[in-house]
Image (spheres, rainbow, N blue to C red):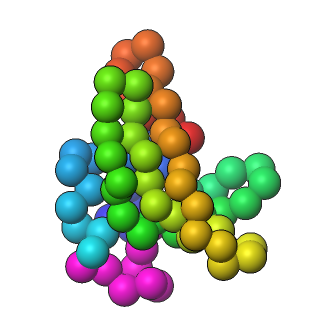
Amino acid sequence: LQTQTQTELLNTDPLFFLSTLTAAERPVLRSSTADYSILERIGEGGFGKVLKCQNLKNNKTVAVKIIKDANGQCLF
């Protein structure tokens, strides 16, 4: 898991392994405004995935929508 890029992680299907990880082991989505620890996958559809995440700056639980690009790859 540690060697996967963020894009590879987002395109792993399903993200079934998340519930087996400790908080320290959970993958982190990094953005210019905040970093998010992925807690679980909420859902998936034709346009992308929705993930339940924890904002690592303020510890708030949020939903993060990951949109697929023209090639069907999920990007954050």
Q: Between residues 30 and 53, which one lies in front from this camera angle?
A: 53
Q: Is residue 43 above or below residue 34?
A: above
Residue for point 66% across, 63% down: 35
Instruction: Please give the name of the residue rendered at 44% of the width and 54% of the height, measured from the top-left corner.
Output: 51
Q: Quadrant of residue 36?
A: bottom right
Residue at image point 44% right, 84% down? 23
* 21 falls in the magenta region: yes
25 relative to 56 in the view: left or right: left
Residue 11 visible, this orientation: no
Tell whether 49 sits left or right of 14: right
**Residue 49, horizontal then vertical, whole percent:** 39, 41
Q: Position of residue 44 (x, y in %)?
A: 31, 39
What is the total number of numbered labels drawn onto the structure image? 0
Inspect the magenta stretch and tell me whether residue 41 lies in it: no
What residue range appears in magenta?
A: 20-27
* Residue drawn 32% across the image and 46% down it: 43
Q: Relative to 15, does residue 76 appear above or below in the rendering?
A: above
